[in-house]
Amino acid sequence: MAMKDMILRGRANVLAVTGVDCSGEAWAIVADGAVTLYTDFRYIPMAHRVAPALKVRDVKRFEADLRRAFGGRGAAERRVGFEKAISVADFEKLKKVLPRAKFVDATRVLQRRRAVKSADEIAKMRAASDLNVAIWKDARRMFRAGMTEREMAGIIRSMMYERGDGEAFDTIVCVGANAAECHHVPDGTVWNGRDGVLVDMGVKLGGYCSDMTRNIPPKRRSALYRKVHDLVLKANRAAIAAVKPGVTGKALDKIARDVIKAGGFGKCFGHSLGHGVGLEIHEPPYASKKSDWTLKPGMFVTIEPGIYLEGNLGVRIEDLVLVTETGCEVLTASAKEDE
């Protein structure tokens, strides 16, 4: 199904098609290839400023225009694409307005369209990732013994708002055994300057996200920590070396998972290897046990194997890579072994 007749509701998809990011109510109608944005009074001036060539109308006109666009002659035969992720209430509204239309799930069409980035998008992704690396370098210098996880996360967050568009997701800072919680929420745990620290962070810049995970190792690394860290690093490198056009997300996940399994920690790597990044922090393509995505040039994917030992320690090493014509380019140019 081509991007000819479609109704968009998701914030990222509306942004991708219109160039306007509306945090409030927004719809986009693509009728015969022409795009119209519908939003409320609060966002119309912003839409005019950001996308002066775009047709923008008050959301109050949405239903009437929807009937006009798809409800006339041939409505019963017309296939109209929609996003599967919209709410039940929104879908019921569409069916009520267009009772004769044939609604087709266009989720995969939208995903394929956004998964391969344009040259302009790639440049923006590089810029976001470069800024993320720079913020990590500067924030790490400011970490001091006696700080809480919240305080360290706050340092990173502050820099992201000062230098970029803020956080792509809630920054994760884990001290010591808290790193065994994959998505630990920073709390009042105090860093003594000796325990290990795991930091998962991503700044947003120019509308695009970045993503990276690094570790500050314990001052005195136990034999177990060294083994786990070396194994995760080995899995990370093996998967990155395998990234190229034609490789499936499933195959990529297996490469990293087999390394960790061979090291005796297979059951301690419970999440998928990675995900795409772009306007959203999690988007196709996916690298997981069940992924049916095949990598193509212009796609981005994270490589983030991890091992988590509850009550003891956790290590995850995450890089963001761009699939190229012959292999891949690692965007997260930050040391992984000594940080």
Image (cartoon, helix red, strand yellow):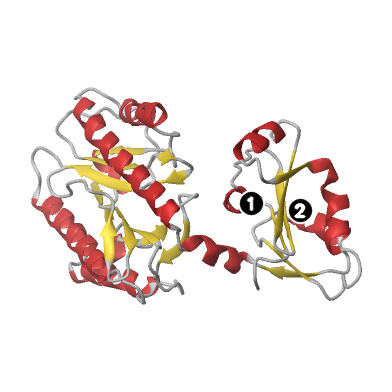
Indicate the quadrant where residue 250 lies.
Answer: bottom left
Callout in the foreground (1, 2): 1
When the figure is inspected, residue 116 is found, relative to residue 177, above or below; the finding is below
Q: Residue 112: where, in percent of width, then height?
A: 53, 67
Disc 2 element: helix
The answer to whether one can see residue 277 in this image is no
Question: Where residue 13 appears, x then y in whole percent?
Answer: 60, 53
- As measured in the structure, the alpha-carbon distance from the residue carrying label 1 to the one carrying label 2 is 11 Å
Residue 78 lies, with reference to residue 48, above or below; the image says below
Mark 2: which amino acid?
A: Asp
**Which of the numbered marks, if any, corresponds to residue 10?**
1
Q: Is residue 188 visible?
A: yes
For the point 63% across and 51% down, which residue is it? 10
- Quadrant, the C terminus: top left
What residue is pinned by disc 2?
90
Q: Earlier in the sequence, mark 1 or mark 2?
A: 1
Q: Position of residue 26 (x, y in %)?
A: 70, 44
